[in-house]
Amino acid sequence: MYPYSTLAETRKGLSNHSVSCTAVVQHFLTRINEQEKLNAFLEVFSETALAKAAEVDAKVKVGTAGKLAGLVIALKDNICYKGHSVSASSKILEGFVSLYSATVVERLLAEDAIIIGRCNCDEFAMGSSNENSAFGNVLNPHHTERVSGGSSGGSTVAVAAGLCHAALGTDTGGSIRQPASFCGVVGMKPTYSRVSRYGVIAYASSFDQVGPLTHTVEDAASILEVISGMDEYDSTLSSKPVPAYTSDLSKTPEKTKIAYIRECVEHEGLDPEIKKHLQGLIATLKADGHTVEAVDFPYLEYLVPAYYVLTTAEASSNLARYDGVHYGYRSPNAVDLESTYKKSRSEGFGTEVKRRILLGTFVLSEGYYDAYYSKGQKVRRLIQDKTNAIFKDYQFILLPTTPGTAFPFGANSADPIKMYLEDIFTVHANHAGIPAISLPLGKHSNGLPFGVQLMAAHFEEPALLRFSAYLMNKT
Ligand code: GLN
């Protein structure tokens, strides 16, 4: 293993002069080249990454380097970086170059992180396997005939395969945590309203959050500390101060009350080995003096249907701007305004994106609004209320991240509903707007990793990260 594979190790190396940012970037550029077949990166920013590395090395020498000096990070291809292409892995954004940087990018750069490239993902972040990208599949580094998970598949594989220290993903219904589970890394979705969405290509605005993919909880905390907090360009952000997520990470947590959702652990679709692993973890936590109890959550079967009603509604509105006029691709066969819209959108979007735009337009249409969209909102409120009630008695909810391990390419492609059910354990946190993390604690007898998920109440990231660090150290 590369001795500087995390930010924490690289920091140490920089402070005792055993390594430079330039050397670390060069190492990753070589790795990216060697692992090109994984298809994790859509574009590598070698030039700007090396230039930034030289700049940071100079700052390190004079002691003025930022908090993230030494961090080499990749972006999901739905996060804008000024002067660089961004496509949301869609043909419709062909040739589009960002005119400004997302707030998260500005903040990373201001603290001297080095951005190494943009990563493949499902088109417009819609998917659970990265098979919906217009630029091909991303291979799981643990088994190259299996999917990476999605939609932040490229970002996750870039970390898992050692092509960078960390990556940013986005999570609307599990897109950070699900691939993290499939690839054996840490993936975290922060509380909704904690991290700015300015400059992040919108899928479903009331669900989307940016978060880190890393090897360690410590690195996730370092990144989160930098990207979180108020932004004048995103009015949905909370004005709550950002705590120092990295402090006290190594402190052993007090005796904690943890809930697990009975319906999740007993779910018939849950792989028996994942179930057994969770039961083992519950027993270990109890043996350590924590209280771990089953709670009922009667809405499990409504999570996915309500998610697909609400997110497709929001997507149909958000994606209306890709019209062949404002951005990217315009059909060469268009002859007038109407055919410009029709043909550009028909040719530019992939099948899944079109399916969701149609579904979203349908659920918002006059005759069906109350039956679907309004009802979806009501279900979301019930989910939120019930979840908040659980957090009155418990500090965390423990559950699987995914029902199984990474599946073979094509396994769910013929049946969108089967694919949507991959999200059953992850969409809960997005409905509720709460923070959730997937920790790479499981190893299946089929050789593949799987994650364990922890959710906490709104803005409880400090406790969530501390308990996660403790769990990672235990096992
Ligand atoms: N798999 C989910 C979907 O397809 C989640 C996507 C995401 O979180 N961006 O919508």
Image (cartoon, rainbow, N blue to C red):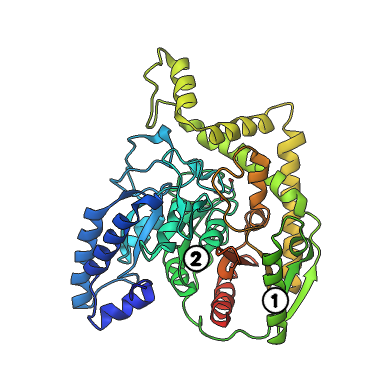
In front here: 415 or 469? 415
- Toward the viewer: 456 or 154? 154
Residue 189 appears anywhere in the view: no
Image quarter for residue 52?
bottom left
Q: Amino acid at mark 1?
A: Gly
Name the disc covering residue 104, or none: none
First-in-chain label (2 vs 1):
2
Residue at x 65% of width, y 67% of height: 457
Left or right of residue 199: residue 110 = left
Mark 2 and mark 1 residues within 8 Å of each other at the beta carbon = no
Element on which disc 2 rests: loop
* Percent coordinates x, y for residue 239 in the rendering: 52, 62
Q: Which mark is residue 280?
A: 1
Alpha carbon separation for disc pair 2 and 1: 20 Å
Residue at the extreme top of the image, as rendered: 335
Quickly name the residue at label 2: 185
Callout in the foreground (2, 1): 1
Q: Secondary structure at mark 1?
A: helix
Q: Nearer the viewer, residue 147 or 56?
A: 147
Mark 2 residue crowding within 10 angstroms, few (<14) / some (14–19) / many (20+): many
Q: Position of residue 65 (x, y in %)?
A: 26, 72
Q: Quadrant of residue 334?
A: top left
433 versus 14 height, above or below: above
Name which residue type carries label 2.
Val
